[in-house]
Image (spheres, rainbow, N blue to C red):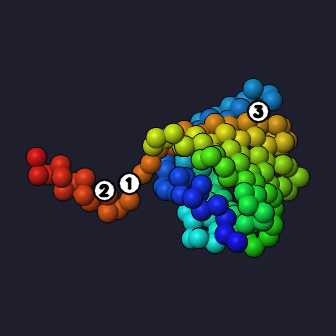
Amino acid sequence: MSIQLEEFQRLVGRYRGTGTWIDTTATSARYTIDHTISSNGDAAAIAFSHNFEDSTSIEGRYRFENSASPIFDVYTDDRLVGHGYVEDGSLHYHIRAGEAYVEVSYRKTGNELRIYGSSTKNADGNYIVWLERLHDVPSDDEAESETAASSDT
């Protein structure tokens, strides 16, 4: 049985944007994001990089495999780390990351993808929440077509 591919198809794409996090000490920061969502019929995946104002960065890769549709298992490095679901264009999952629990929700409207999340512990041990606003990045083929169209005018 495959993951709910129709639902994931609404989210598949490459995105870029910015995010802001804040923790329980009122410390906050902005960061930039590159994010890709893909599917191959049997599974779906996300890959992202976050580049923070202090020049640090993180990357993540997660694979989603069907458990009991619309529920899926979340894997990283072939290790089960959590569960989630996709329904009505929304994606939600939670994972265990070390001693922390992380929950993330995705919602796409038009060409904007919003990602909301929280973790029970950040690097400083504080509860943290974040909001990311991302926009579609044209594929290389689309970018070439747009460049050709603008040079014709």
Residue for point 73% across, 66% down:
66
Residue 135, percent from left and from top: 47, 44
Count neighbours of disc 3 (C-alpha within 10 A) and say few if under 14, some if 14 to 19, many if 20 or more: many
In-image side of 125 versus 87 (left or right): right
Label 1 or label 3, whichever comes before in sequence order: 3
Amino acid at dot 2: Ala
Residue for point 75% across, 54% down:
84
* Camera-nearest residue between 94 and 7: 7
In the picture shown, does residue 107 fall above or below 41?
above
Q: In which quadrant will I find the N terminus?
A: bottom right
Count neighbours of disc 1 (C-alpha within 10 A) and say few if under 14, some if 14 to 19, many if 20 or more: some
Q: Which one is in front in this view, the residue at disc 1 or the one at disc 3?
A: 1
Residue 130 visible in this rendered orientation of the protein: yes
Q: CA gap, disc 1 to disc 3?
A: 33 Å
Residue for point 78% across, 65% down:
67
- Please identify the residue farthest to the right as the structure is shown: 99
* Disc 1 + disc 2, Cβ < 8 Å: yes
Label 3 or label 2, whichever comes before in sequence order: 3
Label 1 or label 2, whichever comes before in sequence order: 1
Residue occupied by mark 3: 23
The image quadrant that residue 54 belongs to is top right
Amino acid at dot 1: Pro
Q: CA gap, disc 1 to disc 2?
A: 6 Å
| Element on which disc 1 rests | loop
Residue occupied by mark 2: 143
Q: Which mark is residue 138?
A: 1
